Image (cartoon, rainbow, N blue to C red):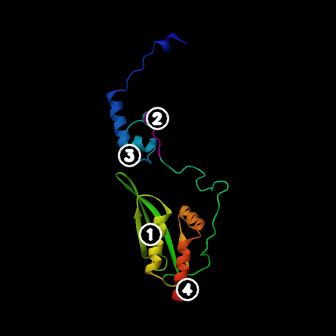
Amino acid sequence: MPRSTYYHRPRPESAENLRLLRRLDELYLDCPFFGSRRMAVTLKVNRKRIQRLMRILGIEALYPKPNLSRPAPGHEIYPYLLRGISIERPNQVWSTDITYIPMHGGFLYLVAVMDWFSRFVLSWELSNTMETSFCLWCCRLCAADRCTDMRSLRSSSEIQVISWRSKKAPCIQLCSACSRRAG
């Protein structure tokens, strides 16, 4: 090992660099998609300096990575059941969707059932856990309120569709039973 390396003491960051680090961190929280070029223009500093400071902070721009739209090997692709069907009346096709709402202490999960013809939200439920039971409860309430000529139910959440299918789709059976009573 060379003597110069052995006795070398790295200098601490200057006050200007510490100010830039703090400002860079604030800017990253506001705009995480900014890369070193946009950060350099915004802060009016050399790009190489921003790159070094971003490495120190361990941050990088958020952007779509390559091959994100390719399915994983063995991933099952479900057929689109509504192809060729024209939606001409209310309660012909319903869909469900689930999303999360960030809260201070965690997340709340919102499930909604919508009519495709009228685009009306027929039923919704909130839960603090993402379990199938509250999704099925929302669907059952909707079916109980609107026992009409409901033909199909579509869900954009594969997890819930798989779990509904594994329980023999009680919601879809309930809806088809309602349509038999109505018709």
Amino acid type of disc 2?
A: Arg
Amino acid type of disc 3?
A: Leu
Q: Mark 4 or mark 1, which has the lower sequence index?
A: 1
**What segment carries the magenta color?**
55-61
Please report the residue visible at 46 percent of the width from the left and 69 percent of the height from the top. Answer: 137
**Under tag 4, what secondary structure?**
helix
Q: Position of residue 78 (x, y in %)?
A: 63, 66
Please name which of the two marks, 4 or 3, marks the residue nearer to the observer. Answer: 4
Category of crowding for the residue at label 1, using alpha-carbon neighbours closer than 10 angstroms: few (below 14), some (14–19), many (at least 20) = some
Number of numbered callouts drawn: 4
Category of crowding for the residue at label 3, using alpha-carbon neighbours closer than 10 angstroms: few (below 14), some (14–19), many (at least 20) = few
Residue 182 visible within the image: yes
Residue 112: which disc? 1
Amino acid type of disc 4?
A: Arg
Question: From the viewer's perspective, is residue 136 above or below residue 128?
Answer: below
Please name which of the two marks, 4 or 2, marks the residue nearer to the observer. Answer: 4
Q: Is residue 57 magenta?
A: yes
Q: Mark 3 or mark 2, which has the lower sequence index?
A: 3
Q: Which residue is mark 3?
A: 29
**Under tag 1, what secondary structure?**
strand
Q: Mark 3 or mark 1, which has the lower sequence index?
A: 3
